[in-house]
Amino acid sequence: MTSPSYDDQNIFAKILRGELPSEKVYEDENTIVIMDIMPRADGHVLVLPKNGSRNIMDIEEADLTAAIKTTQKMARVLKKAFNADGITIHQFNETAGGQMVFHTHFHVIPRTQGITLRPHTGEMEDSDKLKANANKIRAALEA
């Protein structure tokens, strides 16, 4: 079975082109990192490769390498910024695998022992809280 092709009208493609707003916390030549607007924990970010791919099945190796390097960098930064006990990294593929936006991305979520992830309710986080968490991440990146 072949997977559907990449749709350049997905929400992350539009964010990458500047057509939709996002709270960006990091960018390099190959990736950007934005705040998840429906975070499962404070500091939840998304790592996006700049080149379009649907998911891990069709991403170019160089783009995957860049994305995982940025994911590792953000895991370290989030652990520091949120004094986290650990980090959860999610990466979903196709609808049956839980993927909702069909642009390869990694969820990086700071975790505190004994606190469960919030459920994915579809409710957006307060923009002031997102900005405050983004500022914590930016400060940790600069330190």
Image (cartoon, grey):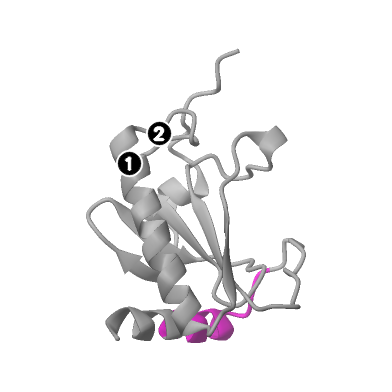
> Would you identify the image quadrant in which residue 72 lies?
bottom left
Tell me if 53 is positioned left or right of 91 in this view.
left
Q: Give yes or no for contact between labels 2 and 1 (Cβ–Cβ under 8 Å).
A: yes
How crowded pointer 2 is (Cα within 10 Å; few <14, some 14-19, many 20+) is rated as some
Answer yes or no: is residue 23 visible: no
Residue occupying the far left of the picture: 29
Label 2: which residue? 59
Image vertical order of residue 99 relative to residue 60, above or below: below
Residue positioned 49% across, 29% down in the render: 57
Residue positioned 40% across, 33% down in the render: 59
Answer yes or no: is residue 33 visible: yes
In the picture, the quarter occupied by the C terminus is bottom left
> Would you identify the image quadrant in which residue 88 lies?
bottom right
Residue situated in front as seen by the camera: 101 or 106: 106
In the picture, the quarter occupied by the N terminus is top right
Residue positioned 65% across, 78% down in the render: 112
Tell me if 56 is positioned left or right of 112 in this view.
left
Q: Give amino acid for label 1.
A: Asp
- Distance CA(mark 2)–CA(mark 1): 7 Å
Q: Give the mark count.
A: 2
Q: Give amino acid for label 2.
A: Ile
Where residue 95 sits: x, y (%)? 68, 35
Q: Secondary structure at mark 2?
A: loop
Where residue 96 sits: x, y (%)? 71, 34
Magenta stretch holds residue 18: no
- Disc marking residue 16: none
Q: Which residues are magenta?
A: 124-135
Where residue 60 sits: x, y (%)? 34, 32
Label 1: which residue? 63
Image vertical order of residue 132 relative to residue 86, above or below: below
Q: Secondary structure at mark 1?
A: helix
Give the main secondary structure of the magenta stretch.
Answer: helix
